[in-house]
Amino acid sequence: MDLCAEMLCRHLEADHPSAVRASRICPKFRRRASALPMIGKQKGARNLDRLLNRFWYYPRYLRRHAGAFDFFHVCDHSYSQLVHELPSQHTGVFCHDQDAFRCLLEPSLEPRPRWLRCMARRVLDGLRKAAIVFHGSRLIRQQMEKYGLIDPDRFVYAPYGIAPEFTPEVRDAEPEDVALAGLDNRPFLLHVGSCIPRKRIDLLLDVFAQVHTRHPDLLLVQVGGTWTEAQRRQINRLRIASSVHQLRGLTRESLACLYRKARVLLQPSEAEGFGLPVLEGLACGAVVVATDLPVLREVGAEAAVYCPLANISAWTDTVCRLLERPSTAPALSARLSHAKRYSWSAHARIILSAYQKLVS
């Protein structure tokens, strides 16, 4: 979401300076519970501060600025509660996925306490008030239409783009954080994303353990997540701890370097709103293997390879085939050509045009 905000502002300023002036409104995060002695270091204190900032301080801050701009663009749908403080007829929201509302839309699959459902309702009601709801994949629109949440006339399709760092060309020396990551030029599989349940890290680890028996020099590099206790236990049970590396806080330059170096990029998710790592990996020339989901098919098309969800043997056989016979992967030219269809410049142009139509 931060990337979307950054790229939108950058391209509005660079590509449309005479049409719009974009300003980022991001108040400083206030520490209250986490600043208290003794309890401030607990996870609950940090979570309480997040709630206070999202539902109290940030909305109050916006009220003082509601008349200062012609339009407001909420870059992250999980902040849609802010629409209640803004002129909704001049406010749009970018909806990336439905995770924030799943406890309301599918309560049997994702039960949550009443207080959390109340907050989710506040967020969803804000989204429904927005004049425009942008979405990065056609799947998001289909899901919204399924539940009848938004007037279809308010949807605008604005797919994501590729940041300039994601290229097959090596521009500078290897970033220091990658050079010091302990990879020692060994071949590795790569996963990019969080470690939340829908990312299916359990499948990722099982597949790697199977592939590792046939390719013992291979490493697994996971970027962006934090292992849960269950995942740590699985790593130990599979006896792959010495071959698994987890990296966080990387720059885009470093991530691009890993995409280029990876033997295969794995994305075994069971659900996604878009699947940006698939697109970024293809832009860097990576061989991508993803779950056979409609949204990942939409993003990767014929440039990626797909496996059925949770089928460990199919994933293992596919990865081993690509390692042992790289020529069976989609051609490099096809991977790069497909990625070039997506651009942040086009993303910004679509969003600006949608707001200009509101004026007319």
Image (cartoon, rainbow, N blue to C red):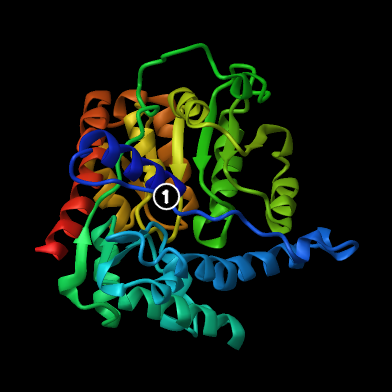
Is 330 or 142 nearer to us in this picture? 142
Residue at screen point 33% across, 57% down: 293
Q: Nearer the viewer, residue 332 or 133?
A: 133
Residue 95 coordinates in the image, percent (x, y):
35, 63
> Which residue corresponds to mark 1?
24
User: In the figure, residue 29 lies in which quadrant?
Assistant: bottom right
Question: Which amino acid type corresponds to the residue marked 1 in the rendered image?
Answer: Arg
Height in image: 197 above or below 118? above
* Residue 297 picture location, percent across and down: 27, 51
Q: Residues within 10 Å of mark 1 (few under 14, many from 20)?
A: few
Question: The C terminus lies in which quarter of the figure?
Answer: bottom left
Query: Element at badge 1?
Result: loop
Q: Vertically, is 288 above or below 159?
A: above
Q: Which residue is depicted at the point 27% across and 42% down?
A: 12
Q: Position of residue 58 (x, y in %)?
A: 54, 65
> To which quarter of the image does residue 15 belong?
top left
Quadrant position of residue 300 = top left
Q: Residue furthest right?
A: 38
Q: Nearer the viewer, residue 88 or 336?
A: 88
Horizontal relation, residue 177 to residue 19: left or right:
right
In the image: residue 320, left or right of residue 116: left
> Which residue: 47% across, 80% down?
122
Q: Picture coordinates of residue 289 (x, y %)? A: 39, 41
Q: Is residue 48 above or below residue 29?
A: below
User: Looking at the image, which is closer to me, 289 or 159?
Assistant: 159
Q: Residue at x 55, y 51 (%)?
A: 194
Extreme left residue here? Answer: 360
Is residue 113 at least partly visible in the picture? no
Examine the rendering and report whether any part of residue 316 can be seen: yes
